[in-house]
Image: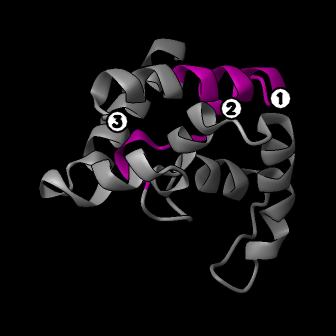
Amino acid sequence: MIFDEFEMEKSVKLAADVLDEMYPQWYEAINLDQIYMEDSVSCVLGQLGRSMNNEFTYPADEKDYSSLFSDVADRVGDDPDVLVAFDLEATEAGADAAYNSGGTGWTTLREVWRRAIRERL
């Protein structure tokens, strides 16, 4: 399977729908200019976790928002179509998109998330 922008859009829609159910208005906590999906602090879940813990400092307090990751993981389960939207490395096709073809996968995933969030604002 080729994990291209079209596939990323489908995955991000599923992932954003999960966040809509679990954390209404989650998108208001996200700084669009600071989304870096390859970084656990600046990715969508990292930013959401930090907004839930105003005193967040990395890495000492990373455990303070680990329950967010656990809650999302419990809700998503092993669904690779959703997992890959949060972390390209969650699937082989996603990892391939992240590191091959010039490594444009992370940038594309960032832009797809930014579009999804703008639609909700």
**Secondary structure category for the residue under label 1:** helix
Label 3 and label 2: CA atoms lie apart by: 26 Å
Magenta segment range? Answer: 13-37
Q: Is residue 35 visible?
A: no
Disc 3 crowd, CA 10 A, few/some/many (<14, 14-19, 20+): some
User: Do tag 2 and tag 1 residues touch (Cβ < 8 Å)?
Assistant: yes
Q: Which residue is farthest top?
A: 119
Residue 13 vertical position relative to residue 112 in the rendered view, above or below: above
**Residue 24 falls inside the magenta stretch:** yes
* Mark 2, residue position: 26
Q: Amino acid at mark 2?
A: Trp
| Residue drawn 65% across the image and 83% down it | 59
**Mark 3 against mark 1, which lies toward the viewer?**
3
Q: Amino acid at mark 3?
A: Phe
**Secondary structure category for the residue under label 2:** helix
Q: Amino acid at mark 1?
A: Met
Quadrant of the frame with the N terminus: top left
**Relative side of 6 to 22, left or right:** left
| Label whose residue precedes the other's in the sequence (3 or 2) | 3
User: Do tag 3 and tag 1 residues touch (Cβ < 8 Å)?
Assistant: no
* Mark 3, residue position: 3
**Picture disc at residue 104:** none
Instruction: Name the quadrant containing residue 56.
Output: bottom right
| Viewer-nearest residue: 72 or 54 | 72
Residue 13 vertical position relative to residue 15 in the rendered view, above or below: above
Percent x, y for residue 96?
32, 53
Percent x, y for residue 14?
61, 22
Q: Is residue 52 visible?
A: yes
